[in-house]
């Protein structure tokens, strides 16, 4: 929780899924930040041959980011709908649930969430 009772979750660390490694580098959901709870940070994927792909989410809060192969080859932009992960992150961290309405930009507060 932040000082203004907004939720904040930041993850740095890795996990393995089969022969593929996943590393989260400062992947964050911060309701009081400029992205109002949208995902920020970099996600790294190591494929079985040992090469890494990185997906760096930009500061424009749109769920899009540049894919890089082996930290040297730009492969283009990928956009994913991360709404499920963002909603899950909000449920993990207790406190108030605040959301920005996408059609109006209005900020709403639902009060305390268990």
Image (cartoon, rainbow, N blue to C red):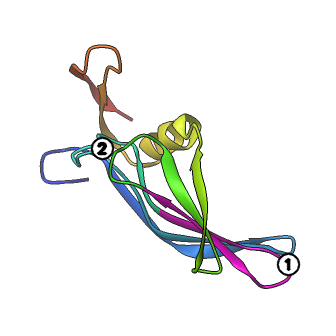
| Residue 21 place in picture, x, y as percent | 73, 74
Q: Residues within 10 Å of mark 2 (few under 14, many from 20)?
A: some
Q: Residue at x 31, y 28 (%)?
A: 99
Most distant residue in the bottom direction: 50
Q: Residue at x 13, y 53 (%)?
A: 3
Q: Nearer the viewer, residue 108 or 39?
A: 39
Q: Residues within 10 Å of mark 1 (few under 14, many from 20)?
A: few
Quarter occupied by residue 62: top left
Residue 86's tag is none
The answer to whether the residues at label 1 and label 2 have Cβ atoms under 8 Å apart is no
Q: SS for tag 1? A: loop
Quarter occupied by residue 107: top left
Q: SS for tag 2? A: loop
**Please, what is the dominant secondary structure of the magenta stretch?**
strand
Instruction: Locate the C terminus and report the quarter of the image it occupies.
Output: top left
Compared to 9, does 38 lie above or below? Answer: above
The disc, 1 or 2, on the residue closer to the chain's N-terminal end is 2
| Residue 98 place in picture, x, y as percent | 28, 31
Name the residue carrying label 2. 35
Name the residue carrying label 1. 48
Magenta-colored span? 42-57
> In the image, is residue 36 part of the stretch drawn in magenta?
no
| Residue 25 place in picture, x, y as percent | 48, 72
Compared to 48, does 61 lie above or below? Answer: above
């Amino acid at each position: 929780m932040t000082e203004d009772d907004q939720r904040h979750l930041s993850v740095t660390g890795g996990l393995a899924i089969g022969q593929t490694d996943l590393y989260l580098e400062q992947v964050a959901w911060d309701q009081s930040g400029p992205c109002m709870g949208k995902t920020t940070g970099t996600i790294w994927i190591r494929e079985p041959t040992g090469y890494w792909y990185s997906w760096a989410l930009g500061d424009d809060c749109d769920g899009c980011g540049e894919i890089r192969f082996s930290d040297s080859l730009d492969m283009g932009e990928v956009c994913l709908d991360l709404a499920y992960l963002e909603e899950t992150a909000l449920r993990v961290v207790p406190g108030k649930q605040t959301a920005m309405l996408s059609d109006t930009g209005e900020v709403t507060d639902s009060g305390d969430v268990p």
